[in-house]
Amino acid sequence: RVAFRTKAVLTQRNLFSRDNHTCQYCGRHKSELRKNEKLTRDHVVPRDLGGKDEWENVVTACNTCNNKKANYRLEDTKFVLKKEPKAPTL
């Protein structure tokens, strides 16, 4: 018997679930965010710079880290990902 694996649909809910509701830059869980902070999605390589809207290029980030990273490539910032973004399978 062969098991087929399919990629999950890239939604904000699935993304946050994949990343355990944790910012992939500072490592804070959603429960540790200040009341004016929230989780967002960030493109590791910004779309303006050729990045795609796909699992391997999108991570969960708190809005504070996302704003600091802005429209830069990861290598042009001080940020380091907590884990490599990969597509989850169903």
Image: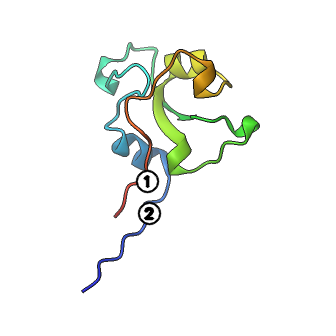
Q: Quadrant of residue 74?
A: top right
- In the image, farthest residue toward the right: 48
Viewer-proximal residue, 88 or 40? Answer: 88
**How far across and down, in percent of the image, does residue 39 sit?**
45, 29
Q: Which of the image's four quarters has the C terminus? A: bottom left
**How far across and down, in percent of the image, does residue 54 sit?**
56, 51
Residue 53 position (above or below residue 78): below
Horizontal side, residue 56 vs residue 82: left or right:
right
Viewer-proximal residue, 75 or 25? Answer: 75
Viewer-proximal residue, 41 or 6? Answer: 6
Q: Amino acid at mark 1?
A: Ala
Mark 1 = which residue? Answer: 87
Few, some or many residues within 10 Å of mark 2 (<14, 14–19, 20+): few
Number of numbered discs overlaid on the protein picture: 2
Residue 63 position (above or below residue 86): above
Q: Amino acid at mark 2?
A: Lys
**How far across and down, in percent of the image, does residue 15 sit?**
43, 45
Mark 2 = which residue? Answer: 7
Nearer-N-terminus badge (1/2): 2
Disc 1 element: loop
**How far across and down, in percent of the image, does residue 70 sit?**
64, 21
- In the image, farthest residue toward the left: 1
- Mark 1–mark 2 contact, CB under 8 Å? yes
